[in-house]
């Protein structure tokens, strides 16, 4: 599933192509792609809207319209493209938004898990999300306090989007290794110095992911090469880049998890 760096990369790519464009019409090819409103209401509401901004919140891509907001969640295989509106739809296209410049914004989703919302109030979709990792209000101190207020294994806690927004399986494994914390560590036992290392590790791996345009692994994502720089994710049996011990794969919270048995002690 695309995580914060992959969605941020898509937002940065689409922003100069979409801002200021008017949406002329919508063509929905699979109704269940649309979480809300109804397809008929979506068609009526979206036509004539101007795209004012393109952004990201957690793993959601956000289009701010002249009246309302569109959110895309790509889930396992969703992707967004700008194409000539005259081109015929492809097999896995789920939504096409015809634009005022003769092109179309196309949501393509092979596995049909992706979802789209058109809402008046962004909180209808993103209101329960936790802080953004790059928000100035999110600090080592606030992370430490939040960890101490819960008694959970640290990896599942970091994956909880109401705790911290944007992290998924890949970047959580990478951040935990960089910080030297084991994914099974109980959150309220983490000391401040460890929380500070984790805070800086989270920001470091996310920034590296963005700089490499995300990772092209476990997804049809098209452009990133951060997978070539993974420390532990997907490297079972290969040497740890720090100590040389073979990377191990565990199941934590029903998720495949990659750790160094020497660098990350519980």
Image (spheres, rainbow, N blue to C red):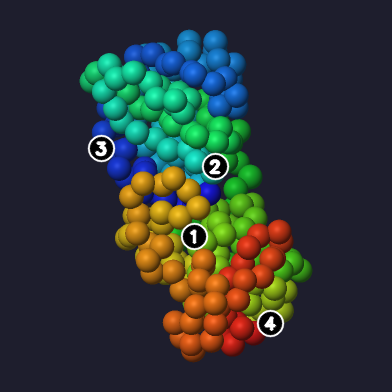
Would you name the residue on which mark 1 appears?
Answer: 133
Residue beneath the point at 39% across and 35% down = 80
Q: Position of residue 228 (x, y in %)?
A: 37, 66
Q: Is residue 137 visible?
A: no
Along the polypeptide, which appears first: circle 3 or circle 2?
A: 3
In three-dimensional space, the C-alpha distance between marks 3 and 4, rounded to whole angstroms, equals 46 Å
Residue 242 at x, y = what percent?
46, 85
Of the numbered discs 3 and 4, the one sitting upstream in the chain is 3
SS assignment at label 2: loop
**Crowd tier of the residue under label 3, counting other residues whose Cα lies within 10 Å: few below 14, some 14–19, many 20 or above:** few
Mark 1 neighbour density, 10 Å: few (under 14) some (14–19) many (20 or more): many
**Could you tell which of marks 2 and 4 lies nearer the N-terminus?**
2
In-front residue for pair 229/10: 229
Identify the residue shown where x is 46% and y is 73%. 231
Front of the two marks 3 and 1:
3
**In this image, 100 relative to 215: left or right?**
left
Of marks 1 and 2, which one's residue comes earlier in the chain?
2
Give the Cα separation between the discs numbered 3 and 1.
24 Å
Residue hosting label 3: 16
Separation of marks 3 and 2 at Cα, in angstroms: 24 Å
* Tag 2 residue: 75
Q: Is residue 3 above or below residue 92?
A: below
């Amino acid at each position: 599933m695309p995580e914060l760096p992959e969605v941020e990369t898509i937002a940065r790519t689409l922003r100069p192509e979409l801002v200021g464009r008017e949406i002329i019409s919508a063509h929905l090819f699979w109704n269940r792609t649309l979480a809300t409103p109804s397809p008929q209401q979506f068609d009526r509401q979206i036509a004539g809207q101007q795209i004012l901004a393109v952004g990201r919140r957690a793993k959601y891509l956000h289009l701010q319209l002249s009246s309302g907001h569109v959110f895309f969640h790509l889930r396992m295989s969703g992707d967004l493209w700008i194409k000539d509106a005259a081109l015929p739809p492809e097999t896995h296209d789920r939504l096409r938004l015809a634009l005022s410049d003769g092109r179309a914004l196309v949501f393509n989703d092979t596995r049909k898990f992706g979802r789209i919302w058109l809402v008046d109030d962004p909180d209808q979709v993103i209101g329960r999300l936790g802080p953004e990792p790059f928000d100035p209000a999110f600090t080592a101190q606030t992370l430490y306090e939040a960890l101490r207020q819960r008694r959970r294994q640290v990896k599942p806690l970091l994956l909880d989007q109401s705790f911290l927004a944007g992290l998924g399986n890949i970047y959580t494994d990478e951040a935990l290794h960089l910080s030297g914390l084991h994914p099974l560590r109980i959150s309220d036992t983490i000391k401040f110095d460890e929380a500070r290392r984790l805070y800086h590790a989270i920001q470091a791996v996310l920034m590296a992911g963005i700089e490499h345009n995300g990772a092209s692994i476990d997804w049809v994502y098209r452009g990133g090469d951060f997978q070539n720089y993974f420390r532990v994710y997907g490297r079972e049996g290969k040497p740890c880049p720090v100590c040389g011990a073979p990377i191990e794969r565990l199941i934590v919270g029903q998720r495949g998890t990659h750790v160094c048995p020497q660098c990350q002690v519980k």
